[in-house]
Amino acid sequence: MSDQLVATATVSATAQRVFPENFLQSSAAYILSQQLDDGSIPWFSGHYADPWDHVEAAMGLSIAGEFAAAEKAYDWLAQNQLPDGSWWAAYRNGEIDNCERRESNFVAYIATGVWHHYLISENRAFLVRLWPVVEKALGFVLSLQSEYGEIQWAVDADGQPLQDALITGCSSVYKSLECGINIAHTLGIESRSWVEGRHRLGIALRENPERFDRTWESKARFSMDWFYPVLSGAFTGNAARMRLQKKWDEFVVAGLGCRCVNDEPWVTVAESCELTMALLAAGEGSKALKIYRALHRWQDSDGGYWTGYVYRDSAIWPEEKTTWTVGAMMLAADALTGLTPASRLFTRVELLDAPQDAERFDHLDQLELSGSQR
């Protein structure tokens, strides 16, 4: 066990009421047991790894103080990055598993993971080493931004943009741009184009819902479309609370957690964790704690967490223990109890001191949130 993990495991009395004893150790051990020698973290043994969920699991390793394993995960991304800054949708056992598309929010998420790891480890050499990877990734993502501000969800196998956008995906990109801007500031690098891109994306998320789900059936049945704009910081304050209250009864099952979709009797652990953090971001701490504390029943003896539960049938489904679910459990635990210096990453918008233009855009964001939200 690493020295940092020993220190992190000594938790406050408050933390002990939030999660079981040895939660961090057992959760980290499960992710480590699934990580491959090349650094990639598949969903579970024998399954594929995708860039977004790989990062989610790596952040869990950082929280537990498993810095070497986390950095190995980010180095795997660096080694597999394509010349245009992107990654394919999935990899399995060292080979490309899905070369049909490259998804913008998958590509952007490395900025969130790298910044998260730096906040905890304070390893500036790591930040410097990963900067070119982050820079290329966010450059690829912003090349897919339309004149209206939204980010196209993917490119096809030939690199042609697939012309539509996802609320959840764009919300994730919004947080990643915040993290990328903070990385650039820490390294003394100008990031004005990222500041502008983030500002335009925020406007699209808050004011232009018609820019999303234009060519397919609405994704509004998915709970992530409901709470991700709050989790990402696109909605804050009263606007965030109003958004969460509006569909609370549609998605939340008392005593169980958050449904994945509004038309199935299925609660999922990862969505419940992300809702926990969105609630904290909106200032709804008691609701957040109530949802999160009910989730530990889904932990198995090996430290993994089952993905979901079909309450109509009293059945675990699917019978999978995904590494990203464990990562989400650890992120929510940190957000609730302040275990690490990265605990507020998903509960506050914290842009570092920035050039004047960045401050102006952030001020405009706050004016829009306070004066124009439904």
Image: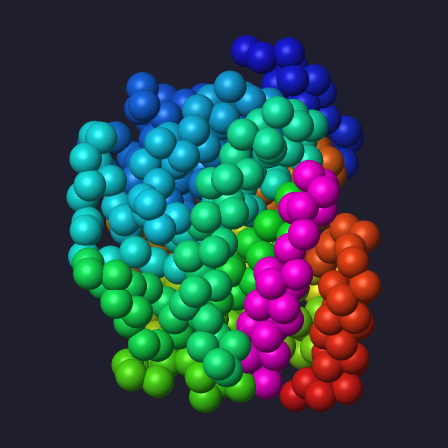
Looking at the image, residue 314 lies above or below residue 23: below
Please tell me whether residue 297 belongs to the stretch shown in magenta. Answer: no
Please give left or right for residue 11 compared with residue 322 in the image. right
Q: Quadrant of residue 301?
A: top left
Where is residue 92? Give x, y as percent: 21, 36
Q: Is residue 262 above or below residue 58?
A: below
Residue 177: where, in percent of width, then height?
58, 57
**From which residue to which does the magenta span run?**
184-207
- Check the image and tell me how it is coloured: rainbow
Q: Nearer the viewer, residue 163 or 324?
A: 163
Residue 32 position in % (x across, y down): 41, 23
Q: Is residue 368 left or right of residue 79?
A: right
Q: Residue at x 74, y 63 (%)?
A: 358
Q: In this orientation, does residue 107 appear?
A: yes
Looking at the figure, which quarter contains the C terminus?
Answer: bottom right
Whether residue 288 is visible, yes or no, is no
* In the foreground, 139 or 293: 139
Measured as percent of width and height from the top left, residue 278 is found at 62, 60
Q: Give the quadrant of residue 276.
A: bottom right
Q: Residue at the location (64% across, 55% down)?
A: 191
Task: Please name the residue shown 19% across and 58% down the image.
Answer: 157
Task: Residue at 77% x, 29% y: name it.
Answer: 12
**Between 312 and 243, which is closer to the camera in this rendering?**
243
